[in-house]
Image (spheres, helix red, strand yellow):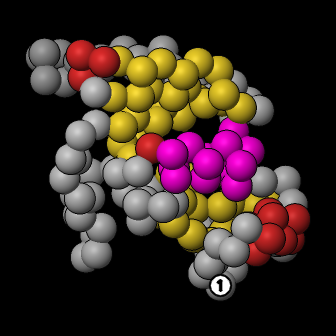
Amino acid sequence: MSCEQAAWPALPLVGVHHVAIIASDYARSRRFYTEVLGLQVVHEHYRAERQSYKLDLQLPDGTQVELFSFPHPPPRPSYPEACGLRHLALRVADMEAGLAALAAHGIAVEPVRTDPFTGALFTFFADPDGLPIELVGPVSVPR
């Protein structure tokens, strides 16, 4: 078996540690991620040498979101969709409760759809900078 044909070992991944997001308005995005999405603050640091905040947030399963501020970040190309990370997907146990919570905060949400492959309910909304966030619920019908 040649090197090209050798079975390379898979990376022993156990999950996602964190997703990093750069905000244009730190205070606005901090409120969104803590008050609207309900993520728990783990650490918050101001790095004077970089004129930057770094906020570590945590989801109930331990996955973290790092929220950064930097002076004058360039806008994120979204529409049409650009190459690279497309969106952040968050799981909810109850889609209706998730939609009600977003509505209570005045967050516009796309119509809920059913994934044709998994049967899971899903929808999209955006963070204050337009980053697409997908809300994924339970399977709506048996597969």
Q: Position of residue 39 (x, y in %)?
A: 69, 39
Could you tell me which residue is drawn at 48 percent across and 61 percent down?
A: 128
Could you tell me which residue is drawn at 57 percent across and 70 percent down?
A: 124
Residue 105 colored in magenta in the image = no
Could you tell me which residue is drawn at 13 percent across and 23 percent down?
A: 4
Q: Is residue 28 left or right of residue 35?
A: left
Q: Quarter of the image for the N terminus: give it.
A: top left
Nearest to the observer: residue 35 or residue 84: 35
Q: Where are the magenta residues, as a range?
A: 27-39
Q: Is residue 15 left or right of residue 129?
A: right
Q: Is residue 12 above or below residue 68?
A: above
Q: Quarter of the image for the C terminus: give it.
A: bottom right
Q: Position of residue 2 (x, y in %)?
A: 12, 17
Magenta stretch: dominant SS? helix
Residue identifier under label 1: 111
Nearest to the observer: residue 43 or residue 131: 43
Residue 19 showing in the rendered view? no
Q: Position of residue 139 (x, y in %)?
A: 79, 64
Q: Amino acid at mark 1?
A: Pro
Q: Is residue 143 left or right of residue 78?
A: right
Nearest to the observer: residue 4 or residue 63: 63
Instruction: Looking at this view, name the residue that lies furthest to the bottom.
Output: 111
Q: Position of residue 42 (x, y in %)?
A: 64, 21
Q: Is residue 109 above or below residue 118?
A: below
